Image: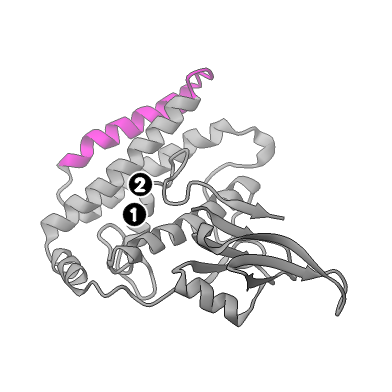
């Protein structure tokens, strides 16, 4: 089931005959225009951008359906989420916390996340460089290959993170070569992103992080207790760990399609 993205400012979501109905007033206090209606059972997630309203019955129906609502600013900055109660899988979370106290297990998990990320980054560069033959892109892919070969020999999380950081920097040096200089994409930057490519990357990562967060909670794990990312207050470390494996894939199974409304 695809998520539903709503970007029309001033729109309101209500439930009508077990369908999610998106509407807006053509004029203040005037005629109502129905923008979209889809069966509630066919919506897995609702993502709201900016000034979008939700009726109380709509909130109730979405919670019963276990359909989370993600709130973003009009520019795509994350604001919060509405979801149902925490799943009652205490034994799973207890096992998760126990594993967090096992340095060997934590390191191997972290290696798995980093390995998957670098592997996808290398494949993306190689795929797009087949016809280009750009030596800078090829060099970045080779550096990622060397980093992957070194990962099994890492014995501490700090050294693993250092290798991951250097490899990711190499990746973006190659990745930027895929864009015309007119895009102004010279490096990966954020808070705020300085060019259109970084804006889209940050926006995509925001959506991916929320998809990963929802997936983690669905199976009963604690999204704040991760293995690769440092555990810190209000940081969904495990969700961030999981999204590393999908960050640079051409597509993701976490949320592979969507219904857009503009």
Q: If the image is split into quadrants, where does the C terminus sit?
A: bottom right
Task: State the image coordinates of residue 254 (x, y, percent, origin top left).
Answer: 42, 51
- Dividing the picture into quadrants, the one containing residue 6 is bottom right
Q: Is residue 79 left or right of residue 223?
A: right
* Residue positioned 53% across, 67% down in the render: 70
* Residue positioned 77% across, 69% down in the render: 24
Residue labelled with disc 2: 245
| Res 69 visible | yes
- Magenta stretch: give its range: 129-152
* Residue positioned 35% across, 32% down in the render: 143
Classify 10 Å Cα crowding around label 1: few (below 14), some (14-19), many (20 and above).
many
Q: Tell me the element at label 1.
A: helix
- Dividing the picture into quadrants, the one containing residue 167 is top left
Q: Is residue 252 left or right of residue 8?
A: left
| Res 82 visible | no
Nearest the viewer among 15 and 127 is 15
Residue labelled with disc 1: 242
153 is higher (above) or lower (below) than 26: above
Q: Are marks 2 and 1 in contact (CB under 8 Å)?
A: yes
């Amino acid at each position: 089931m695809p998520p539903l993205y709503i970007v029309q400012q001033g729109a309101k979501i209500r439930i009508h005959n077990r369908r999610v109905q998106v509407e807006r007033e053509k004029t203040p206090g005037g005629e109502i225009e129905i923008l979209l209606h889809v069966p509630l059972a066919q919506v897995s997630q609702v993502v709201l951008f900016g000034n979008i309203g939700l009726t109380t019955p709509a909130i109730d129906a979405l919670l019963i359906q276990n359909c989370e609502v993600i709130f973003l600013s009009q520019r795509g900055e994350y604001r919060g989420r509405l979801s149902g109660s925490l799943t009652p899988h205490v034994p799973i979370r207890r096992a998760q916390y126990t594993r967090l106290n096992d340095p060997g297990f934590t390191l191997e998990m972290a290696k798995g996340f980093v390995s998957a990320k670098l592997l996808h980054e290398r494949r993306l560069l190689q795929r797009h460089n087949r016809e280009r033959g750009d030596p800078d892109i090829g060099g970045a892919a080779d550096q990622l290959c060397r980093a992957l070969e070194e990962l099994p020999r890492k014995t501490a999380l700090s050294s693993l993170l250092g290798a991951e950081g250097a490899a990711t920097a190499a990746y973006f040096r190659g990745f930027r070569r895929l864009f015309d200089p007119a895009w102004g994409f010279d490096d990966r930057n954020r808070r705020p992103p300085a060019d259109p490519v970084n804006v889209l990357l940050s926006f995509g990562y925001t959506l991916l992080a929320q998809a990963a967060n929802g997936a983690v909670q669905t199976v009963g794990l604690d999204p704040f207790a991760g293995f690769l990312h440092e555990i810190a207050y209000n940081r969904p470390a495990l969700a961030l760990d999981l999204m590393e494996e999908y960050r640079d894939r051409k597509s993701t199974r976490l949320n592979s399609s969507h219904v857009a409304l503009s």
